[in-house]
Amino acid sequence: MPEAKVRNIGIPNVNPPEKVCDDPNCPFHGSLPVRGRVMEGTVTSTKMYKTITFQQDYLSLVKKYSRYERRKSKKHAHLPPCIDVSIGDTIKAVECRPLSKTVSCVVVSATRKTLDEED
């Protein structure tokens, strides 16, 4: 079998996955260009077809009290078949062109949830 062509997507500290896929919307094995923000979050749902939901946690300043409050937002990201994730994993998603009404980013790497993080 010939060696599969893997694209360099130009994002530092992101290595291509071991598995190979034939998804045209995969940034590594397809032709989807990535650009813009690199987001990190925790996977909250994998029930959609080739799509996940992830949650971003961030701090927001409340000027009146000069304190920060914790906030969160949920976003959708395309999941290529060459990347395996499950609920609770930490992922890196990168902005791309809109793939559907709510999906405009793609997962480029995933880190497994360890037993220590569950507690």
Image (spheres, rainbow, N blue to C red):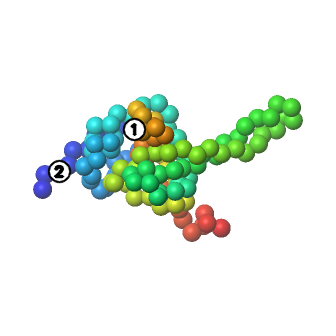
Q: Amino acid at mark 1?
A: Leu
Q: Please tell me whether residue 59 is drawn above or below residue 43 in the rendered image.
A: above
- Who is closer to the viewer here, 35 or 44? 44
Q: Quick check: 57 left or right of 90? A: right
Give the CA separation, mark 1 to mark 2. Answer: 28 Å
Residue 44 in the image, given as x and y percentages of width and height? 55, 56
The residue pinned by badge 2 equals 3
- Sequence order check, earlier mark of 1 and 2: 2
55 up-or-down from 103: above or below: below
Which kind of residue does numbered mark 2 sit on? Glu
Q: How many callouts does the rendering have?
A: 2
**Residue at position x 62%, y 44% in the image:** 73
Could you say where residue 12 lies in the image, as x and y percent from the top left? 43, 39
Farthest left residue? 1
Q: Which residue is mark 1?
A: 99
Q: Which quadrant holds residue 62?
A: top right
Residues tagged 1 and 2 counted as in contact (Cβ below 8 A) = no
Residue depicted at x 20% and y 49%: 4
Measuring from the top left, give residue 88's x and y in whole percent: 55, 60
